[in-house]
Amino acid sequence: MPDYLDKWPPIDELLITRLNEMYAMTDSDLQAEQWDRAFLAGQRDVVKKIASIHEQQHKRAQKAQHKRH
């Protein structure tokens, strides 16, 4: 069965950096309306998931590289 990572395109670290900048959680966000806080939390969740997949892809690539050497 194919690994779920195979379903994702390679994720660039710069994308994660930019998403973290765009959707950073700030103290003022905590004072926002409940709906806005929930929306931002959802955005942060997506960024965290993408970052997690990137990290797994990176680990897999390193492991494959070590096997070749």
Image: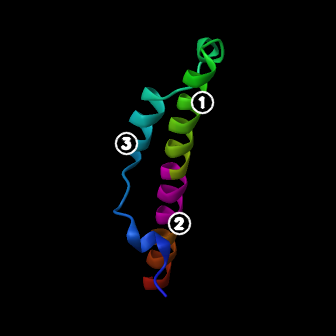
**C-alpha span from label 1 to label 3:** 25 Å
Indicate the secondary structure of the residue bearing disc 1. Answer: helix
In the image, is residue 9 part of the stretch drawn in magenta?
no
* Pair 1/3: label in front: 1
Query: Residue 14, labelled with which disc?
Result: 3
**C-alpha span from label 2 to label 3:** 17 Å
Decide: is 18 above or below 35: below
Number of callouts in the render?
3
- Residue type indicated by callout 1: Ala
Q: For this rendering, which residue is in front, 22 or 14?
A: 22
Percent from the top left, x then y, of residue 29? 59, 17
Decide: is 14 above or below 59: above
Percent from the top left, x then y, of residue 51? 51, 49
What span is colored magenta in the figure?
A: 50-59
Q: For this rendering, which residue is in front, 37 or 16?
A: 37
Decide: is 63 above or below 18: below
Percent from the top left, x then y, of residue 45? 57, 42
Indicate the secondary structure of the residue bearing disc 2. Answer: helix
Q: For this rendering, which residue is in front, 40 or 34?
A: 34
Residue underneath mark 1: 38
Q: Decide: marks 1, 3 in contact (CB < 8 A)?
A: no
Indicate the secondary structure of the residue bearing disc 3. Answer: helix
Residue farthest to the bottom?
Answer: 1
**C-alpha span from label 2 to label 1:** 31 Å
